[in-house]
Amino acid sequence: MVRIGEGWCEIPTRPLSTRSAKAAVELGNSLATFRKLQGLTAAQVSDRAGITRNTLRNLERGEATVGLDVLLEVSRVLGVLDYLVKGLNPYETDLGQALAQARLVENRPLPQRVRQ
């Protein structure tokens, strides 16, 4: 349930695939490990990220109901935000590079935002 104005509204969530649920748990475990390796408490991280400890706990448990904003802020606090962003850069991954190369071989232009 989320608060909207003066009331609460239940936002329906669709179930995650098994693979996505496992990835959420792995991501949460990784964030928890980074926190512990830095000697930070859940209270310190949640305070610096501007979230509640329960929200941080949900993220670290892999509950996919937390928002993207929470993932980004916690990643920032833990110093791993740049790694998260770079890891999703299509031109920094083998898959993205292969897809770009295939487009060039097929003589299809790359998306407008990446043309030089």
Image: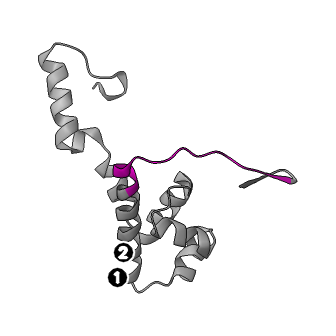
Dividing the picture into quadrants, the one containing residue 67 is: bottom right
* 28 up-or-down from 22: above or below: below
State the mark number for residue 105. Answer: none
Q: Position of residue 32 (x, y in %)?
A: 41, 74
For badge 1, the amino acid type reads Leu
Q: How is the image coloured?
A: one colour
Q: Mark 1 Cα within 10 Å, few/some/many (few <14, many 20+)? A: few
User: Which residue is found at the position 15% from the left and 33% from the top?
Assistant: 98
The foreground one among 64 and 47 is 64
In the rendered structure, does residue 115 fall within the stretch colored magenta?
Answer: no
The foreground one among 109 and 60 is 60
Left or right for 48, reference 20 = right
Residue that carries the numbered disc 2 in the rendered image: 34
Left or right for 76, reference 65 = left
For badge 2, the amino acid type reads Phe
Tally the numbered discs.
Answer: 2
Mark 1 to mark 2 CA distance (whole Å): 5 Å
Q: Where does the magenta region start and end?
A: 7-21
Q: Mark 2 Cα within 10 Å, few/some/many (few <14, many 20+)? A: some
Q: Position of residue 57 (x, y in %)?
A: 53, 72
Q: Secondary structure at mark 1?
A: helix
Extreme left residue here? 105
State the mark number for residue 37. Answer: 1
Extreme right residue here? 6
Q: Position of residue 71 (x, y in %)?
A: 49, 59
Left or right for 86, reference 81 = left
User: Which residue is found at the position 59% from the left and 68% from the top?
Assistant: 55
In the rendered structure, does residue 10 fall within the stretch colored magenta?
Answer: yes
Dividing the picture into quadrants, the one containing residue 21 is: bottom left
Q: Secondary structure at mark 2?
A: helix
